[in-house]
Amino acid sequence: MKCVICKHGSTKSGTMTATFERDGATIVIKGVPAEVCEICGESYLSEEVSKKLLKQAEDAARAGVQVDIRKFMAA
């Protein structure tokens, strides 16, 4: 896929780190599967990964954490 941000790079399979902040909580999820631009590093997530990522972040926020760093869980 051609990167829509830099318009020059192509994406390849890789991973990224997602950071969420809400109501004083910071949630970091590492190892998220993504298509990553080889030039600018912009990351693109599939719909399935996006849904899982948001659910994991929401679960952590609901648990009342203030700072949480976790690895992405594919299942």
Image: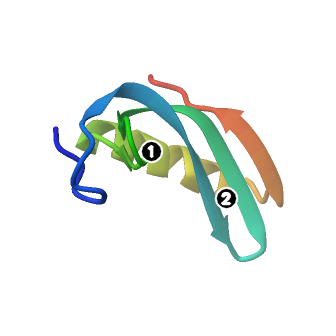
Taking 43 as reference, is 28 left or right?
right
Kind of residue sitting beneath label 2: Ala
Q: Which residue is mark 1?
A: 41
Taking 56 as reference, is 66 left or right?
right
Rendering colour mode: rainbow
Q: Which mark is nearer the camera, 1 or 2?
A: 1
Other-residue count near label 1 (Cα within 10 Å), few / some / many at <14 / 14–19 / ≥20: some
Looking at the image, residue 68 lies above or below residue 25: above
For the C terminus, the quadrant is top left
Residue 60 vs residue 18, the one in the foreground? 18
Looking at the image, residue 34 lies above or below residue 14: below
Q: Secondary structure at mark 1?
A: loop
**Image x and y of residue 24, in percent:** 78, 74
Q: Quadrant of residue 30?
A: top right
Residue sitting at x 70%, y 35%? 70
**Image x and y of residue 37, in percent:** 35, 40
- Marks 1 and 2, how far apart at CA: 27 Å
Kind of residue sitting beneath label 1: Gly
Taking 48 as reference, is 60 left or right?
right
Q: Secondary structure at mark 2?
A: helix
Residue sitting at x 17%, y 43%? 2
Q: Which residue is mark 2?
A: 61
